[in-house]
């Protein structure tokens, strides 16, 4: 049986071997224990590089994908970041170590309450959680330096592009929900939007409206 330190070493090794090489991202992922974000039956598997079920029929993403998305976002310590799709809160907790402030929006009230309770327990004070349909963004807090969408859209949502600062970066999985999607990075410049395709991914869909739990 491996102890916690060994499991965490293996966890970081898996991240590096799958292309997460940015030392700030690896540092943040080393400090944010995935354990508290995975509950019940699956808590034993928190250090595996695999997505796992959470409440409301949703998933906590695969750690190496969390690392690659965070790396692609290139967050600076002064950044204001919007995350769409709080889920377990794990991704937001990692962003909170790299950014000045993180706003995270989730359509299930129950997931927001559970994530909020973990942030409080871990003494994380720079995350603002909101219940809502994140595909509209958060106009009252815009513009954002960085936007991370953790559910798959058919196209990068227009309101989110509009709420990105010039010089800002958005990372979003794009494609139909039942097929392999592409992780897209959008950079907003004075001249328009530059897109690049990073890797194939598989995410739950970005849905309209609020969830019923
Ligand atoms: N970032 C999460 C984490 O660290 O655990 C994983 C997110 S999970 C793959 C996708 C989440 O997006 C789900 O919790 C789902 O309810 C949420 N979601 C889907 N459509 C949404 C929308 N329009 N607005 C806000 N959240 C949405």
Image (cartoon, rainbow, N blue to C red):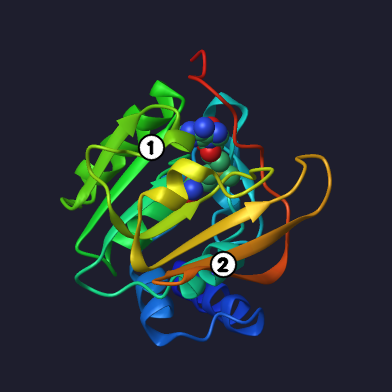
Using the rendered view, name the quadrant where residue 30 is placed. Answer: bottom left
Q: Position of residue 50 (x, y in %)?
A: 66, 57
Q: Mark 1 and mark 2: span between their CA atoms?
A: 20 Å
Q: Is residue 103 left or right of residue 181?
A: left
| Callout 1–callout 2 Cβ contact below 8 Å | no
Q: Position of residue 97 (x, y in %)?
A: 27, 66
**Image quadrant where one finds the N terminus:** bottom right
Label 2 element class:
strand
Residue 136, placed above or below residue 197:
above
Going from the N terminus, do you reach mark 1 or mark 2 first? 1
> Which residue lies at the image location 63% right of the left edge and 45% below the top edge?
52
- The outermost residue toward the front is 191
Q: Nearer the viewer, residue 206 or 160?
A: 160
Residue for point 38% across, 37% down: 105
Q: Residue lying furthest top in this view?
A: 212
Q: How many marks?
A: 2
Would residue 116 appear left or right of 213 to someone viewing this image? left
Q: Tell me if residue 114 comes above or below residue 186 in the rendering.
A: above
Residue 133 placement, left or right of 2: left
Q: Quadrant of residue 41?
A: top right
How many residues crowd mark 2 within 10 Å: few (<14), some (14–19), many (20+)? Answer: many
| Mark linked to residue 105 | 1
Instruction: Using the rendered view, name the quadrant where residue 199 is placed.
Output: bottom right
Nearest to the observer: residue 168 or residue 98? 168
Q: Which residue is mark 2?
A: 185
User: Mark 1: few, some, or many residues within 10 Å (few <14, many ≥20)?
Assistant: many
Residue 138 in view of the camera: yes
Q: Secondary structure at mark 1?
A: strand
Q: Is mark 1 within 8 Å of ligand 1?
A: yes
Between 188 and 32, which is closer to the camera in this rendering? 188
Residue at position x 30%, y 56% in the image: 144
């Amino acid at each position: 049986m491996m102890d916690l330190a060994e499991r965490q070493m293996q966890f970081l090794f898996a991240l590096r071997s799958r292309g997460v090489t940015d030392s700030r991202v690896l540092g943040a992922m080393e400090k944010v224990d995935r354990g508290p974000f995975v509950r019940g039956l699956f808590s034993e598997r928190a250090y595996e590089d695999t997505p796992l079920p959470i409440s409301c029929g949703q998933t906590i993403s695969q750690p190496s994908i969390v690392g690659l998305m965070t790396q692609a976002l290139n967050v600076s310590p002064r950044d204001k970041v919007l995350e769409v799709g709080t889920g377990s809160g794990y991704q937001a907790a990692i962003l909170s170590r790299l950014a000045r402030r993180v706003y995270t929006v989730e359509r299930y009230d129950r997931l927001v309450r559970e994530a909020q309770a973990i942030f409080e327990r871990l003494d994380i004070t720079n995350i603002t959680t909101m219940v809502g349909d994140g595909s509209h963004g958060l106009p009252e807090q815009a513009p954002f330096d960085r936007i991370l969408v953790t559910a798959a859209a058919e196209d990068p949502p227009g309101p989110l592009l509009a709420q990105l600062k010039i010089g800002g970066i958005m990372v979003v999985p794009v494609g139909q929900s039942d097929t392999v999607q592409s992780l897209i990075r959008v950079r907003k410049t004075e001249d328009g939007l530059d897109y690049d395709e990073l890797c194939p991914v598989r995410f739950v869909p970005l849905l309209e409206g609020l969830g019923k739990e």
